[in-house]
Amino acid sequence: MPFSIKIDQPVFAGAISWELKQSATDPTRIGKEYNIAFKADPLIMIEGRLDLLFIATKIPYLGQAIKALTATADAIDGSDDFWNWLVETFGGDDEDKINIDVDYHVDLFASGELKLESKASTYHTVDGFTFNDIGATGEIKFGIDCELRAKFETKKITSEAVMGGQAFAKFTTDFTADQIKLEYDGLFAVVYAKFETNKNKNKGGFSDKPEKKSKPKDKFKIHDGFTYIKETKIA
């Protein structure tokens, strides 16, 4: 499918403590006051992805270039069949056979996330509920994500390489009892790479610890954003 939607389950956390406390509305009475902390991070998260390679094949000229790129990748992916045929034809051993897998994607993605948090709300058995310091945060992100995975495998060696990157814009909205904050965080780029090799000592499959060469995800800000704040507190 050229389009996909992912919905994550909500994640909740909370804590409750209590103490005896004088009533704020009736000083002659004492009741139990429960302090409530609550967090949903996220309450809901939705991400949609569109396969740009699939869409690009429908565009003149660009589609031809994408098809040529796909054909090249498929040729590399299928080159192990030709090699293994040569090995079988000339009486080679299974240890001489190889397996090559190439996978890649270029996606346009958009995601939305909503978080809720209450840090200092209370419930008093006489006064009832008092909601303090309750906030909601909404986050919207959209951009382009690409990744290339290549795997080379023999009886003795397994090597895998992963390279990818993202370019995305991020928008954040914070709602509290005092203000509404709208923020464009900026335009970012992320690049990463990972290389891993396992050396098999024998046909039984015993392996050395993998030799890893990984580049962490580097995040670059292409340009800064801006912030807009509106006070909503009523005097």
Image (spheres, grey):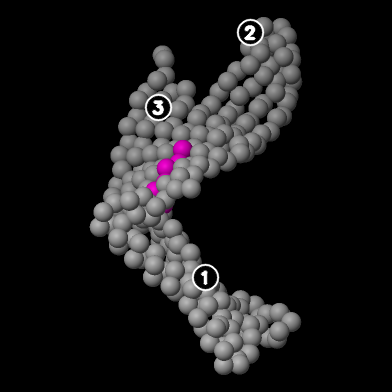
Q: Residues within 10 Å of mark 2 (few under 14, many from 20)?
A: few
Q: Indicate the secondary structure of the residue bearing disc 2.
A: loop
Snapshot quadrant of residue 93: bottom right
Q: CA distance from mark 3 to mark 1?
A: 50 Å
Foreground disc of the pair 3, 1: 1
Note whether residue 37 is visible.
Answer: yes
Where residue 99 appears, as percent x and y from the top left, is 56, 76
Where residue 37 appears, as percent x and y from the top left, is 63, 31
Does 18 sit left or right of 155 as displayed?
Answer: right
Does 157 sit left or right of 28 as displayed?
Answer: left
Quadrant (top left, top right, bottom left, bottom right) of the C terminus? top left
Foreground disc of the pair 2, 3: 3
Specify the segment rendered in magenta: 107-112
Tag 2 residue: 25
Q: Which mark is residue 180?
A: 3
Q: Indicate the secondary structure of the residue bearing disc 3.
A: strand
**Residue 5 to residue 130: above or below:** below
Snapshot quadrant of residue 95: bottom right
In the image, what residue type sits under mark 3?
Ile
**Residue 85 to residue 146: above or below:** below
Tag 1 residue: 101
Say if the magenta span includes residue 109: yes
**Residue 217 to residue 161: above or below:** above
**Residue at point 37%, 23% (across, down):** 231
In the image, what residue type sits under mark 1?
Asp
**Residue 102 to residue 94: above or below:** above
